[in-house]
Structure formats: structure tokens, C-alpha cells
Amino acid sequence: MYPAVVVRTRLAPSPTGALHLGNARTFLLTWLWARAQGAELVFRMEDLDGPRTKPGAAEEALADLRWLGLDWDGEVLWQSRRAAAHAEALAALRRKGLVYPCACTRKEILAARSAPNEGDGRARYPGTCRGRGAEVLAGGRPPAWRFRAPPGRRLRFRDGLRGPEEGVPADVEGDFVVAKKTGEAAYQLAVVVDDAFQGVDCVIRGDDLVPSTFLQLLLYEALELPVPRFVHLPLVRGPDGRRLAKRHGDTRLRRYREAGVPPERVLGLLAHWSGLGPREPVSARELLARGFAWERVPRADRTFTAADDAWLLAG
Ligand code: GLU
């Protein structure tokens, strides 16, 4: 007998602010895919990001998702309680000589890099502390830890929605931070360690994280963890073409919830953006009953407009 194949994906919000329509769309599609497949859907609260995490935002995110009618399997895993596992992974990377301590400040990095990184706005680390490990450790300032991204090494993966992807991890931001000066794991390390711990074999998230996927592939390899499949979804943008955010007005789920907008209306807009039906009120269960396939989800980004906002509030 072959062992049963478990397919498991996850919802993994960061409580750095309230969930907005863009986040909600990613979570709705993840939920629909999981439920339509009979896959398991676990939940992880990515509450690591020190000062950026807002008090109460985690509880609010849970309440928002329940209001939409989305559910998940098992208990919430709080990433902030995984410090021991993250430290163990960092120790493994240290033993293998794949990371080095870095005491540079943000200002020093910006001043030292030769040319600004066009396009994606990420500062590429110029490698100042590479090869200075003992000196940095003796220096007294608590260091961050950076992973040595092999120059020129190109990686490939097949995205479930976008098809074949390839990129050079070292070109994303150079040697990247896996642990911060505070001792906390950085996103790239925490997400890999925790996805593996939760047995996630399909990662579904916004396509702004495609560059991060290349960094994470290096960590899966270094830590000898099974690599999941990836599905990166197009983003919801504002009328100015930028990723949906506060500057586009208040698109927090909480605002609509408190204004008395029925969740079915919000779901109707999200479903319409996702090629799953007309812009009309619908419940999560009804959407599921219609069936779900990635083929129906448009590959292009969607734009949130004032007319969408007015339509939501008219309900
Ligand atoms: N917590 C991240 C976010 O809310 C998602 C990380 C991931 O899916 O890998 O943007």
C-alpha cells in the first residue's frame, strides 16, 4: 500500500495591520482551493515582526475571517511561540557555515551599496560583514545573521498559477537576513521552518512574494526540508496601480463589517475579481458549491475602484 498523500495548505496572516480586501482575496482563494480538494487547511499567525505587529490585530484577523465564513483545521499556530525551533534552525545553518553575523545598520548598508537596486525597492546587501565573523561577534553589538546567497546561482520552480519561474536568489537582496539583531527569526527563516513543521506542502500567497520564494528555496535546501509547491496569486491594486494599501482609502474588512455590509457582498466582489462569478452577493459555501479551479482565476492583477467601494456599501 502507498501511504496516503496529505495535501495541506495554510492561511498565514501577519498582524501588522488590519486585513483588507487584498488579503481577504488571497485567503478566500486558499480556502476554496483547500476545501474543493479536500486538502487540509492550517492556520499560522505570523506575529513575529516585533514593533510592526499591532496589538489586537491578530484577534481581529481571526474575527474577520470567521465573519467571511472561512474556517480552518486545528488550532492556530502562533509564530511567536516557535522561537526555540527557529533558533535550532539558525544553529544548524551556523554549523554548516552558511550564515554569518552582521552588525551593519540600515544607514551603513544604504551608504555602502554601489548602485541602487532598480525596480523592486529592495536594498541589496553589499557583503560588508562577509568574512568578518569573529570581529563582528567580538564587537559587542548584537548581530543579525545573514545567509550567504551563492552569486549567480539560478533556481527554478513551477508555480501552480504562473508556470515556470526562474531567478537568481543572490540578485534579490544579496546575502539576506535570517535572524534579526533582536534575536528573532526573520520572515524568510521563520516561514520555511514553520511551513515544514506544519507539514504544508502547498503554499498559496500573493505574487509580491515570488522573489522571497527564491530565498526560501535556498533555506529548504540548506535545512534539508521538503520543498512545497507554490501558487502565487496576482495582487489587488488601487487605481494608481500600486498594491492595495491604506493610501487607497479604508478597505479594511473591519470597516465593512462595522458598517453593516453583509459578508456575502464582500465575498461577491472577491469572487468577481477572481473569475468565479458576477459581482453579486454570495456565501463562501455557495462559492464552494460552484466548484473551484485555478484555470478560472485571471492571471492579471485586479483593480479596486471607488465604484467597488460604493457597491459594497450599498448593500
Ligand atoms: N504573513 C505574510 C503576509 O501576510 C505571508 C507570508 C507567506 O504567505 O509566506 O504577507
Image (cartoon, grey):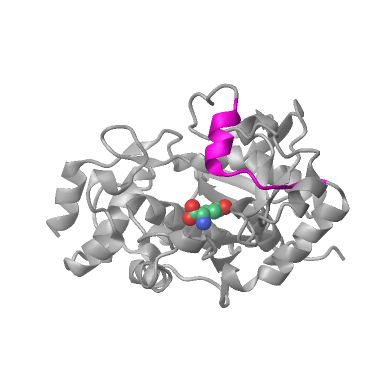
Left or right side of 59 for 239 = left
The answer to whether any part of residue 291 appears in the image is no
The residue under the point 77% across, 29% down is 153
Viewport quadrant of the N terminus: bottom right
Q: Is residue 25 above or below residue 65?
A: above
Q: Is residue 263 above or below residue 224?
A: below
The residue under the point 29% across, 54% down is 268
Q: What x and y, as percent, mark residue 258?
A: 20, 69
The answer to whether any part of residue 176 appears in the image is yes
Q: What x and y, as percent, mark residue 308?
A: 21, 46
- Furthest-left residue in view? 314
Residue 27 in magenta? no
Left or right side of 170 for 281 = left
Q: What x and y, as percent, mark residue 133?
A: 80, 46
Q: Is residue 124 above or below residue 292?
A: above
Q: What x and y, as percent, mark residue 221?
A: 80, 47
Q: Which residues are magenta?
A: 98-113
Q: How many marks?
A: 0
The residue under the point 74% across, 37% down is 149
Give the quadrant of residue 148: top right
Camera-nearest residue between 126 and 303: 126
